[in-house]
Image: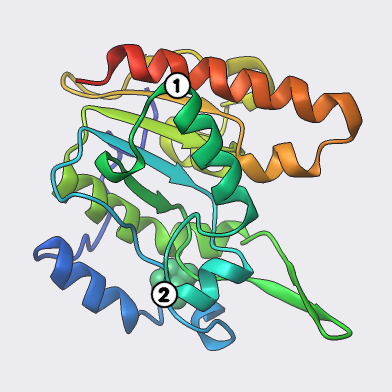
Amino acid sequence: MDTLLAKPVQEIPDGSLAALRRQARACHACPLWKRATQTVFGEGPERAALMLIGEQPGLQEDREGLPFVGPAGRVLDRALAEVGIDRGTLFLTNTVKHFKYEVRGTAKLHKRANAAEQAACRMWLAAELARVQPRLIVALGAMAAQTLFGNGFRITRDRGQWRDLDEHTQGMATWHPSAILRAPGDRRDVLYRELVEDLRSVARRKP
Ligand code: SF4
């Protein structure tokens, strides 16, 4: 399978997680660092059994330097609480580590990182995976899912299905909480219930 774990990633940085975090603060491998406040590196125990991978930091994450601390993070927290997963036991990170946005008036509006920016940032995600060595990986949203499972992955078709990433590691993908927040009307409740259902499956496998 064409997965991030199976693909050789050039120049995976060396060092402990703390050393990687320091190195990532000075990363200039794509232009996104120029307009963002800071690098938002992953957070969590160095040997977490479960890693959740989102897409890219938003406004709040950019300000605080931590992943999943904005509105999407609150949706995730609610869903994790429903299925009894303690956020403190997880390693939470993003596919891309800097906030990308466009300015409209006084607002900074989220803009999706392009393929070149995603590719440039893959070394940091690969380094996090190599250090943490989670047994379970959950991709939140299409960007993380395609990074993990390849470009043929379709979140609408393939979410909630466990796949072997290597002999020790299994992965699945589900909705990104931001997609739930953007969904109209009743669709929002449907997607949220699907996120909870998928996380329940994670909780059943989590040691
Ligand atoms: S988005 Fe990733 S690759 Fe680009 S500058 Fe930030 S840390 Fe480096």
The percent coordinates of residue 160 (x first, y second) are 52, 16
Q: Is residue 31 above or below residue 1?
A: below
Furthest residue to the left?
Answer: 15
Q: Ligand 1: give its quadrant.
A: bottom left
Instruction: Identify the mark at residue 39; answer none if there is no mark.
Output: 2
Q: Is residue 97 left or right of residue 178?
A: left
**Point 87% across, 24% down: residue:** 186
Q: Secondary structure at mark 1?
A: helix
Q: Secondary structure at mark 2?
A: loop
**Quadrant hosting residue 158:** top right
Residue density around tag 1, few if under 14, some if 14–19, many if 20 or more, within 10 Å: some
The percent coordinates of residue 62 (x first, y second) are 53, 73
Q: Is residue 40 above or below residue 159?
A: below
**Quadrant hosting residue 152:** top right
Q: Is residue 132 left or right of residue 138?
A: left
Instruction: Identify the mark at residue 83; answer none if there is no mark.
Output: 1
Q: Is residue 183 above or below residue 66?
A: above
Q: Quadrant of the N terminus?
A: top left
- Mark 2 and ligand 1: say if the CB distance to the nearest ligand atom is below 8 Å: yes
